[in-house]
């Protein structure tokens, strides 16, 4: 077996190598690589540009197979991201409220202790 790379094309064609164009059997799977491969904009739908293969299955029916696109931003993914962000904000608010409540409770108990101490002092003085 020889693994060679054509560096420079000579004057003649090489039969089977430079005469025929063999299409890619497999295309890119990742969404951004599909965009780069076809020169698409970020707003265009990459699902239409996936390289699919058509074959006949055992039942004799024409079937098309296409790969699952990785890193595809769908409305559900956006919704989940918004939900995560909202959960973070809610948790931050809850922690802040709990801290305020705890500080209020501590100051109330300190005030009660101070009042009890002062009432004990005043009862001893009499």
Image (cartoon, rainbow, N blue to C red):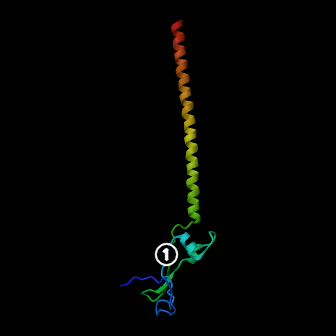
Residue at (52, 16) in percent of width and height: 117
The correct choice, above or below, for 112 with respect to 7 in the image is above
Residue under the point 52% across and 21% down: 113
Where does the C terminus fall, quadrant-wise? top right
* Quarter assignment of residue 31: bottom right
Depth check, front residue: 1 or 107? 1
Q: Position of residue 99 (x, y in %)?
A: 55, 37
Relative to 56, does residue 118 appear above or below in the rendering? above
Q: Residue at x 56, y 49 (%)?
A: 88
Q: Is residue 104 above or below residue 79?
A: above
Determine the residue positioned at 53% across, 24% down. Answer: 110
Q: Residue 28: where, in percent of width, then height? A: 51, 74
Count of residue discs: 1
Label 1 neighbour load within 10 Å: few <14, some 14-19, many 20+: some
Image quadrant holding the N terminus, namely bottom left
Residue 62, given in percent of the width and then of the height, sits at 49, 87
Residue holding disc 1: 67
Work out which residue is located at the far top of the displayed protein and give it: 126
Q: Secondary structure under badge 1?
A: loop
Q: Residue furthest left?
A: 1
Task: Please indicate whether residue 17 sits to the left or right of residue 76 in the image.
Answer: left
Q: Residue 78 at what x, y percent from top left? A: 58, 61
Foreground residue among 82 and 112? 82
């Amino acid at each position: 077996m020889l693994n060679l790379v054509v560096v420079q094309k000579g004057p003649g064609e090489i039969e089977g190598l430079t005469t025929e164009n063999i299409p890619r059997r497999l295309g890119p799977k990742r969404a951004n690589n599909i965009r780069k491969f076809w020169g698409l904009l970020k707003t265009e739908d990459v699902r239409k540009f996936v390289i699919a293969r058509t074959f006949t299955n055992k039942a004799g029916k024409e079937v098309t197979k296409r790969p699952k696109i990785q890193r595809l931003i769908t409305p559900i993914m956006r919704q989940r991201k918004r939900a995560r962000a909202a959960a973070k904000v809610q948790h931050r608010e809850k922690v802040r409220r709990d801290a305020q409540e705890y500080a209020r409770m501590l100051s109330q108990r300190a005030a009660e202790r101070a009042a009890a101490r002062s009432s004990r002092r005043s009862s001893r003085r009499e």
